Amino acid sequence: MPFLLGRKANWKPLSPRFNCHPYFKVRAAGAPTSSGAWQVPDLCAAYNWPANLSGGGVIGIVELGGGWVQSDIDAYFQSIGQPSPSLTDVSVDGTTNSPGQDADMEVALDIQVAGAAYYAATGKPATIRMYWSQDIASAVGKASADGCAVCSISWGADEANWGAEACAQMDAAAQAATQAGTVVFAAAGDNDSSDGGPNAANVDCPASCPHVVGCGGTNKTATSEVVWNDNPGQTDGEGTGGGYSTVFPPQVWQINAASAPSGLGRMVPDVAADADPNTGYIIFQGGSQQIVGGTSAVAPLYAGLFAALGNKLGFVTPTLWANPSAFILITSGGNGQYNAGPQPSPCTGLGVPVGTKIAAIESGAATGKDTLVLNVGQTSQASIEALLANGVTPSNGKLSDVAYLFADPSATVVNNADGLTATVTGVAAGMATGMASCTITDSDGVVSKWSQTFTITTK
């Protein structure tokens, strides 16, 4: 449930299908109006945002209720010295921009964070399309069909509210969107490990969907950053959602992630950024300045960055997991059931962004090639990411560009310049998943062989 001015709202879910609600938190009444809060450009600078990117990606934002007014948008962007973005409302099912509701805060947060993050990376005003719908999957599909580079979702509910069938349908919509080139981000929830559910450990959909980048939250000051949890020791307080799916199995590309408890699956979230309202985002809503947090600020923050990187990036999650150095791992704090530690955790995933490194990775990936991701369950816990020329993988073909990354933090990346060669067999052109046989020979002549399930994602 969102908190309004320090009290728990009498919240009626605006999406009755799955009791979905927005994930924003407003700083408690009486707190200093500026202490500890971030202007988005300053937060982007703290996360080493890239600059002067070409941009061009359209930002799609899904909203199930509430609305926005131009005066709030203009006041905010004038306050940070940026031009206002171009905004277009799209009704998917008759739902419309309808200001005058509690959810207006969510809408303002999404627009202002996404637009400011995009401008920080490009120096250009964003183009944002607002998708109004009572069904998240339908809105994602429409955003993708309209050619949006990214789609940001700040609404969700515990997987149990959705049910396995609806969760699978949501992921199918996200998968179709990523195949069309749209990157999909979703908030991981604001109620610690319980996600507001009846048990101590639940995860939020759509953030739990494998084809969605789940976005968790931190408390970030100028000098430190920890897992966001304003109620330590509780599993249903104010803090980042996160845990393991009961619907989706573990994902092979979640390299070096903390192991799931028996019977549970995909780890959530994948990434994180500042979300605590006590170190929140300064925005404008209802004609005045507000300080707002929640994991619903994290999804549009990443959406603004990835839209600045261009179009058709699609299913980026395996690439992010194969490049942990593009993030700063959060090692302190917990969300009730789970704690951060020396590996990606079900509190903050890979960690918080190093924007310039993410830009370098995705700029290299956006070459029209495919990405083959293999997770190796051997003692070395190695993984391979191979770029396949022209999207074709010949059987018995030698891979021309291979990065060999050990999970051991002390190990180094070995590439062809260091004498590494790789051969993958059993993968035919047009295949999306399957079993491959892999042989790696390093510069010292050491040979490693294994068979492993693979996933190919089109860039």
Image (cartoon, rainbow, N blue to C red):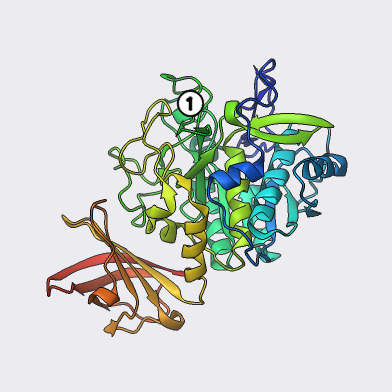
Relative to 184, 410 lies left or right? left
Q: Residue furthest right?
A: 71
Which residue is nearer to you in this view: 78 or 183? 78
Judge whether 219 appears above or below 67 on screen: above
Residue 142 x %, y %: 69, 59
Residue 364 x %, y %: 47, 70
In the picture, the quarter occupied by the N terminus is: top right
The quadrant holding residue 276 is top right
Q: Which residue is mark 1?
A: 229
Q: Residue furthest front?
A: 223
Quick check: can you spot residue 63? no
Residue at image point 75% right, 51% down: 130
Judge whether 387 appears above or below 407 on screen: below
Residue 24 x %, y %: 64, 33
Q: Residue furthest top?
A: 30
Quick check: can you spot residue 107? yes
